[in-house]
Amino acid sequence: MTQATLVLQDGATLQGEAFGAEADAVFELVFNTSMTGYQEILTDPSYRGQGVLFTVSHIGNVGINLEDDESAAPQVSAAVVRALSPLVSNWRAAQDLSSWLAQHGAPGISGVDTRYLARKLRDGGTQKAALSTKGTPPATLLQMANDWPGLDGRDTVKEVTCSKAYAWQGDAGEHWIAPRPAARQKPVHLVAYDFGAKRNILRHLASYGAAITVVPADCTAQEALALNPDGIFLSNGPGDPEGLPYAVQAVSELLQAHVPILGICLGHQLLGMAAGGRKRRLKFGHHGGNHPVKHLPSGKALITAQNHNYYIEAESLDAARVEITALSLNDGSLEGMRFKQQPVVSVQFHPEAAPGPHDAHDIFTEFFQLL
């Protein structure tokens, strides 16, 4: 096996075995605590600009299949794992993890102490890092990591959004989502802003019988409303919402139009900023499929999937305009809200990712009831 080197911005250096592409990569290193679903994680556009450290010890055993992608290719800059499975054992697998990453130019490192790294990031916060699977010296990697500007204030959405509007026609994974009762007899038309939308969210929206027009992230409110939608969906996506002033402007204008809106993850943050809320960065982010959230209207605890580094401060929102509907049971951060005088709801977590497995699906039903 070829040696790989991972260097963090504080100088911590780890040697391991290379897999995936032969390449150098610079990224923000975050840890994900999900026990399953590595293919969905690696193809989630919200990870653009980041390297994912998996805390589960064994990765790659079910290979890569043709149905579970959240986008057309891996979106992560790198993968960091404790042990890479040498065998693939799953009836749906089309290829192994390493060759798939190599095909798309993403490097990986295995055989490193992921428990040490997770604790380091948990205690000290997220760090920039550099990985080489082609022999670049540690000193050079350290310089690369420290020279990289990072994700704060950067527009990474432009790297993952669609280039032009299109009608969602479903995909190979849609048969895993059971059809829901239609919201009304007339088909609902949604305009979905693609800030890095996960396919499984679009599958869930379509399962209610909705016709979906997906538009690029820079679509203006006027252009979106000209499509005569019954509702607007603001998708998840990567990076810092403050790097998207054009999106905040569009969301502000959509709010003035009083059209029903659903926001998830980055879409939730953009709604919060459009309502005058303050954005803050989390110490090490929320990344995993086991995050407990308290749903305030019902008093229930939901087990949710999450992937974000930023959040909106609940206390910065106008209580006369916005009702807080969900809070993290880990750190108390804002996880859900609805507008009191407008048909607008949003959540910070990912209701489509099924960690509970169905704890959070009600947000889709609530949105279609608003429609």
Image (cartoon, rainbow, N blue to C red):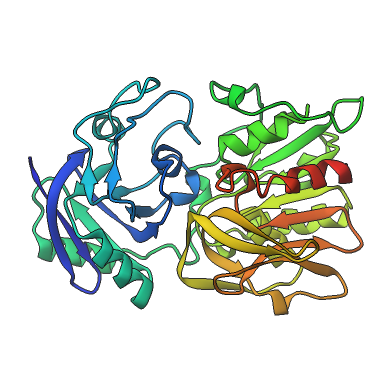
On screen, residue 364 versus residue 356, left or right, reads right
Question: Residue at left 50%, top 71%?
Answer: 282
Q: Split into 4 quadrants, where in the image is the N terminus?
A: top left
On screen, residue 242 versus residue 33, left or right, reads right
Q: Is residue 32 above or below residue 214?
A: below
On the question of residue 50 being in view, the answer is: yes
**Residue 61 at x, y percent in the picture:** 29, 34
On the question of residue 162 being in view, the answer is: no
**Residue 259 at x, y percent in the picture:** 86, 48
**Residue 264 at x, y percent in the picture:** 66, 51
**Residue 64 at x, y percent in the picture:** 36, 29
Question: Residue at left 72%, top 29%?
Answer: 207
Question: Residue at left 92%, top 62%?
Answer: 341
Q: Nearer the viewer, residue 83 or 183?
A: 83
On screen, residue 244 versus residue 45, left or right, reads right
On screen, residue 228 versus residue 122, left or right, reads right
Q: Nearer the viewer, residue 71 or 84?
A: 84
Question: Residue at left 15%, top 44%?
Answer: 18
Q: Which residue is the extreme one toward the front?
A: 300
- Please tell me in which quadrant of the rendered image residue 196 appears: top right
- Please tell me in which quadrant of the rendered image residue 291 appears: bottom right
Q: Split into 4 quadrants, where in the image is the C terminus?
A: top right
